[in-house]
Image (cartoon, grey):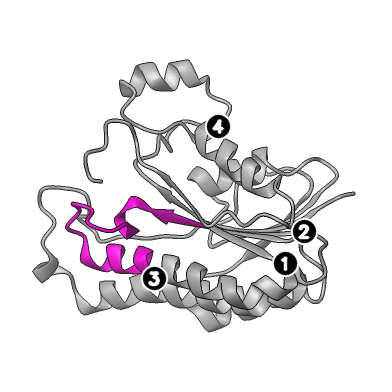
C-alpha cells in the first residue's frame, strides 16, 4: 500500500535526505520548507511555509493536506544562535529578536503542527511521528547554547506528554537526539568517503536514515520513545 508522508524541513541537509531516501516511488510526500527544494522527486508535493510564523505556516500546510490521511509525520526543523557551537558564542549577546525567532520556529511551530495533523494520522493503520532532536536536549550536556538547548529539551517534553494522548490511537511518537551530522555530504555519498573526509568525527546521514527506517518499520504494538545518537568522537554528552 502506498504511504503518505508529511516531512518538514526538506530543502537541505537531513530533511532533504529523508524526503529523497525514505519514501518509495509510489508513496506521496508532502514536503514543507521555506525555500523550494532542488532535485525533488516526482512524488513530492512541496508546501512553502515560514515556520518563524507558526500560525500562518500551519494554515498553509493544512490548506494543501486537508483531510488526507497521513501515515508518517517527520518534523526536522531547528535553527540556532548566530555564533552557536563556536568559541565566540555568548548568551548575553543574543538579541531578543533572535531568541524569540528560535522559540517560534523550534517550539511553537512544532506544537501547532503536531496538534493540527493528529486527526490525519488517526486515519492510518500504523501511524508514526518522528521529531528530530539533538544531544543539546539531553541531560547534563556540555553545550553553552541556551535558546537552542531549551528548544531541544522542549521537543522531548512534547514527545513524552503527547505519547499519553496518542496511546489510545496506537500512534507512535519518537524523537531522535542527534549529535554532529555530516550534512554537507548527500545521503548517496559513499559512507567510507564520508568517514575518511571527516576523520570519522561526524555522523553520516545514512546512519540517521537507518534509525528512521527502524522506527517506521515497527508495528503499532511497539513504542520507540527515544534514540540518542551522539557522534563517537563527540564529548558534549
* First-in-chain label (4 vs 2): 2
Residue 142 counted in the magenta span: yes
Task: Tell me where the magenta segment starts and ends, as one range.
Answer: 131-154
Kindly report the distance in space between the C-alpha atoms of the residues bearing marks 1 and 3. Answer: 23 Å
Mark 1 = which residue? 170
Kindly report the distance in space between the C-alpha atoms of the residues bearing marks 3 and 4. Answer: 28 Å
Comparing labels 1 and 2, the label whose residue is closer to the camera: 1
Proximity of marks 1 and 3: CB atoms separated by less than 8 Å: no
Image position of 50 (left or right of 74): left
Kindly report the distance in space between the C-alpha atoms of the residues bearing marks 4 and 2. Answer: 26 Å
Label 2 residue SS: loop
- Which dot marks residue 126? 2
How many numbered marks, from 0 up?
A: 4
Mark 3 = which residue? 154
Q: Position of residue 153 (x, y in %)?
A: 35, 66
- Of the pair 156 and 164, the residue shown nearer to us: 164
Proximity of marks 1 and 2: CB atoms separated by less than 8 Å: yes
- Which dot marks residue 33? none
* First-in-chain label (2 vs 3): 2
Mark 4 = which residue? 187
Comparing labels 1 and 3, the label whose residue is closer to the camera: 1
Q: Position of residue 225 (x, y in %)?
A: 53, 57
Proximity of marks 4 and 2: CB atoms separated by less than 8 Å: no
Would you identify the image quadrant in which residue 133 lies? bottom left
At 37% across and 16% down in the image, what residue appears? 196
Proximity of marks 3 and 4: CB atoms separated by less than 8 Å: no
Q: Within 10 Å of the Cα at label 2, are there few (<14), some (14-19), or many (20+) other Cα atoms?
A: many
Amino acid at each position: 500500500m502506498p504511504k503518505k508522508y508529511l516531512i518538514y524541513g526538506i530543502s537541505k541537509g537531513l530533511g532533504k535526505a529523508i524526503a529523497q531516501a525514505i519514501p518509495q516511488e509510489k508513496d506521496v510526500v508532502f514536503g514543507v520548507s521555506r525555500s523550494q527544494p532542488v532535485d525533488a522527486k516526482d512524488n513530492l508535493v512541496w508546501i512553502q511555509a515560514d515556520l518563524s510564523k507558526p500560525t500562518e505556516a500551519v494554515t498553509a500546510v493544512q490548506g494543501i493536506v486537508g483531510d488526507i490521511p497521513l501515515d508518517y509525520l517527520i518534523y526536522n526543523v531547528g535553527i540556532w544562535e548566530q555564533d552557536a557551537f563556536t568559541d565566540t558564542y555568548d548568551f548575553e549577546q543574543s538579541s531578543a529578536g533572535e531568541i524569540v525567532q528560535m522559540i517560534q520556529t523550534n517550539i511553537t511551530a512544532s506544537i501547532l503542527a503536531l496538534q493540527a495533523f493528529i486527526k490525519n494520522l488517526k486515519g492510518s493503520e500504523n501511524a508514526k511521528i518522528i521529531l528530530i532532536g539533538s544531544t543539546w536536549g539531553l541531560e547534563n550536556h556540555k553545550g553553552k547554547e541556551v535558546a537552542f538547548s531549551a528548544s531541544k529539551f522542549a521537543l522531548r517534553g512534547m514527545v513524552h506528554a503527547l505519547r499519553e494522548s496518542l496511546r489510545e490511537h496506537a500512534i507512535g511518537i519518537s524523537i531522535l537526539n542527534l549529535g554532529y551530522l555530516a550534512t554537507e555530504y548527500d545521503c548517496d555519498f559513499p559512507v567510507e568517503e564520508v568517514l575518511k573526509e571527516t576523520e570519522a568525527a561526524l555522523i553520516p546521514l545514512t546512519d540517521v536514515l537507518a534509525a528512521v527506517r527502524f522506527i517506521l518499520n515497527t508495528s503499532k504494538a511497539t513504542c520507540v520513545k527515544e534514540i540518542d545518537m551522539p557522534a563517537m568522537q563527540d564529548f558534549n554528552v
